[in-house]
Amino acid sequence: MKDRTRTSSPKLSRRGYLLATGAVGASALAGCTAPISNTTVVTTSAEHSSPDLEKWVDEVPRPGVVEPTGTKEGQPHYEVELSEVEQQLHSDLPPTTVWGYGGQYPGPTIEAEQGEPIYVRWKNMLPDEHLLPEDTTVHPEMIPYDTPGSRVVTHLHGGNVEAESDGNPLAWTTRAFEKTGPEFEKKDYYYENDQPPATLWYHDHSLGITRLNVYAGLAGFYILRNDHERELGLPDGEYEVPLVFQDRRFEEDGSLFYPTAVPDQDDSVPDPSIVPQFYGDTSVVNGKVWPRLSVEPRKYRFRLLNGANSRYYNLRLLEYDEDAEETGEAASPFVQIGNDGGLLAEPVEIDGRLEMGPGQRADVVVDFADYAGETLLLHNDAPATFTGESGGGEGSEPLPQVVLVDVGESEVEDDSRVPSTLTEVPEIGLDGVAEERYLTLAQDVDEYGRELFLLGTENEQSGLKMDDPVTETPTLGDTEIWSFANFTGMSHPMHLHLVHFQVLGRQPTGDYDPAEDELDLDALEAPEPYELGWNDVVSVHPGEVVHVAVHFGEHDGLFTDQTGEYMWHCHMIEHEDHDMMRPFEVLPDDET
């Protein structure tokens, strides 16, 4: 028997598009699932449902804040262990075995100050045997599946950090650094924190098993603050609440249930097998199943994170009759004050729903003053296979109910505010654009006939593999336009490591051919209100090309100069693992 050390948890090409439109209906069935045990049983989503649990029983917990364990070179030094723990995710479920940072799922929040660097040692103390079945046909040429130990590497998502500390997918380690990947360089990651205050998050990024490690629980908040933000008068303290939205499936014994088979699987497909997407049937918020959130009738600041593997959220607060289980009119709107990369220049009232793709963050203020004594529901109308419009298709499974909100009856004093101006967001100028890159989102099948999503270039529109030579090599100090053209049948949240970009706009793929057309900014559909400011994830919907401006290096006093190899990929983690991820390399400005 392999070691399973545990600790206790505190309560605390255009061809691709045509292929996709015929294939995605079947791929939506990829929420297929199988019991997690030493003997894999192949099951599809139609044959499995999570236990019928009573909703709105447990209160939403708030992740604790981790403290430094010492100093290194005069800066705070954190040591955060990754371990296997038992955690109660619902009062009526037996404890669930999960993987957590700092002994909890989600991991404890790291709070840092702009301009004050920290060191973090992510210490792998996980058991040798993985909690979930691994498909050893994913990147076998790069992953030593026969090496004992669970491989992990932590990426600070949204961090403007040195390449050595970015969490390269091949910089993995096993327990206590016994074995390390070919790109491993250091035990102590250095986070400079010289970027705007923002809601960042950390999560595993190990090549080929990111989907499994994050699903097992390896994720947490990293909040960067500064004095300017504190002086704005926004809700703070107990009235500032981080919320991570995820979807899961469970067995009757409380164990996690994750796909191990593709639809209509035959003997030629590996068992267990990676699946194209994962969609759970149970809402989990901050590690609690179907929870309720108690608030006072006043303003709250919510730092929202879509931490799901594949699911989109399209959110709005609705009035809710809990006894009749019926929704009513729209309630207080979201006032968005920030997104991935920090504060917006000015607040934006979201007229309708707030769209969040996997990996995206939204910093919002909600005023509950007019809803004293009422019950509200955070409602999601995004179908599982998301297209930005109706979406769906056969087998798509929506998750409409996210979290219940109980508004207290007693009046309270509220001196918080949302000022009309939040910060200055310098525009990335386009006068000196060094390169315009046309980057395709393509679809194919692998050698086993499984759905495969790829990233390509103007010259290789059908897509390239993760280990193909680097094709994106910006030079430090350059501004570039990256144009993501989606020829698949579903939406993809595209994420760039290291940098934050500004969304220029969208247009149909048929209206822009880089070999023939100049980019006409006036012809673009404007960014959505929640896409203003600094972004590190952008949703690219089917049949559209999204243009973003990216500056590599310091910009108007913000961010830092970094060179080296980083990743860009779809943040649907099943896609990222297989094979929708590519490296880019930032070159020094003196290199020819």
Image (tube, grey):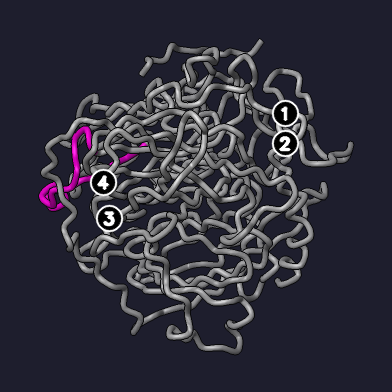
Q: Which residue is mark 2?
A: 32
Q: Is residue 233 magenta?
A: yes
Kindly identify the amino acid type of the residue bearing the numbered disc 1. Answer: His
The part of the chain drawn in magenta is 221-239
Residue 507 visible in the shown view: yes
What is the spatial separation of the Cα atoms under label 4 and label 3, in whole angstroms? 13 Å
Q: Looking at the picture, how far across and down is residue 46, in whole percent?
A: 76, 34
Q: Are marks 1 and 2 in contact (CB under 8 Å)?
A: yes
Label 4's element? Answer: strand
Q: Nearer the viewer, residue 215 or 337?
A: 337
Residue 367's tag is 4
Residue 563 visible in the shown view: no
Q: Which residue is mark 1?
A: 48
Q: Is residue 286 positioned above or below 15 on the image?
A: above
Q: Looking at the picture, how far across and down is residue 185, in whole percent?
A: 42, 41
The quadrant of the rendering that contains the N terminus is top right
Q: Which residue is mark 3?
A: 337
Residue at 63% in and 13% down = 2
Instruction: Work out whether mark 1 precedes mark 4 in sequence or the reverse, and give the earlier one.
Output: 1
Residue at 67% in and 53% down = 392
Q: State the residue lying farthest toward the right.
A: 267
